[in-house]
Image (cartoon, rainbow, N blue to C red):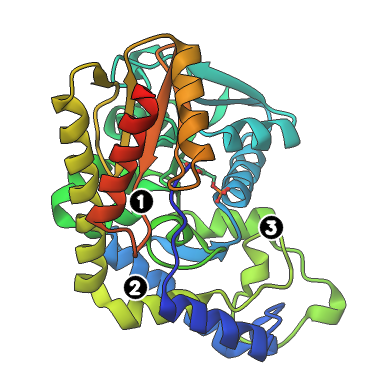
Amino acid sequence: YFATTGSEPGVLAELLIAGLNQVGILWRASPALQELEELTLDWLRQLLGLPEGFDGHIEDTASTGVLAALVVARSLQPDRRVVVCSEHAHSLADKAAKLLELELRKVSVDDAFRLRPELLELDDACAVVATIGTTGAGAVDPTPAIADACEAAGTWLHVDAAYAGSAAICPELRHHFAGWERADSIGVNPHKWLGVPMDCSALLTRRPHDFRRAFSLVPEFLQSPDDAVNLSELSIPLGRRFRALKLWAVLRCYGRVGLQERIREHIRLAALFEEWVRGEPGWEVVAPRNFSLVCFRKDGTDEENERLLERVNDSGEVFLSHARLGGRYSLRLAVGNFRTTEDDVGLAWDVLRREASG
Ligand SMILES: Cc1ncc(COP(=O)(O)O)c(C=O)c1O
């Protein structure tokens, strides 16, 4: 999995959110909630380097966000019943396709676990879900080539950057995000790597009017003369929590530079761990490291690596997870908590080597 993220400003804001207990069903039910959500999402857009024209709102999770995006894509092309993603896409694509009764077509990946765009056939596809920062390997699908194919076929492009998206606040990492500005919709989870406690998933879209066409349903008792598009007209739920307050608190307290420092530190720690693994005979890094996730394994069988992971986690000292990469059982170390230090990562490496030799 990815590390849990959270921070003091985020936690304090959660307390306030619970205390205020806003129920944002309409702009007039809580103007502050809606105005702050629009403002903070625009700040986030700017931090991520996305151009003007992307509107955002907050969903509970990336899974709900992709479901909403696919609802819009399907509504635009009801005759196209296929969604395309790579075999390494998160299972949110499987779940959304299942719920919408669409067929999910998985495209194979190259040796860096990236979707192979030359295999895309989109004539019958209403949407492609590309991933920047896959769950298993942290791989980056080639978004520019995928966007070309989507534009040629008139297919909706959703970019799932739930984990890695927060890294786009660092200009030196923006190359991973080339082409995402051409997506119709993008999911980024500040609750994964930006210090915002669960739950806070940003859905950014260049197509807010299509979202409104697909989702707007304002019954008589909710109609009002206000000159505002209620956020409930852009998404599945009617009522919404004041999640923007915790995103606002985190953005205001850390600022651009403070958040960049933390992301850079996590990447430094992951790079350090990667160096240790590469330098140790009998251990292997099994995927290119793009962000703060290192995928590796110990010489030996899948079963031996699986047992190693169990022993490491049973120790209670650290917690790692696994992925199957290129058919092989691999271990994953993901850095992402604001309190993780070099000592913690060093401890993880000590525990791994201890349990591997025991
Ligand atoms: C790339 C990616 N997308 C989506 C998700 C799911 O996110 P959520 O729990 O917000 O639905 C994850 C979770 O790890 C992920 O890594």
Residue denoted by label 1:
165
The kind of residue on which mark 1 rests is Gly
Q: Nearer the viewer, mark 3 or mark 1?
A: 1
Camera-nearest residue between 155 and 27: 27
Q: Secondary structure at mark 2?
A: helix
Vertical arrangement, residue 191 with respect to residue 122, above or below: below
Q: CA distance from mark 1 to mark 2?
A: 14 Å
Q: Secondary structure at mark 1?
A: helix
Q: Nearer the viewer, mark 2 or mark 3?
A: 2
Vertical arrangement, residue 175 with respect to residue 78, above or below: below
Q: CA distance from mark 2 to mark 3?
A: 25 Å
- Mark 3 or 1, nearer chain start: 1
Residue denoted by label 3:
215
Residue denoted by label 2:
43
Q: Say which quarter of the image contains residue 231.
A: bottom right
- Mark 1 or 2, nearer chain start: 2
Vertical arrangement, residue 101 with respect to residue 243, above or below: above
Q: Say which quarter of the image contains residue 283.
A: top left
Residue 11, position as x, y percentages in the image: 50, 77
Instruction: Tell me, yes or no, if residue 88 can be seen here.
Output: no
Quarter of the image with the C terminus in it: top left
Q: Residue at x 57, y 46 (%)?
A: 69
Residue 22, position as x, y percentages in the image: 67, 85
Q: CA distance from mark 3 to mark 1?
A: 25 Å
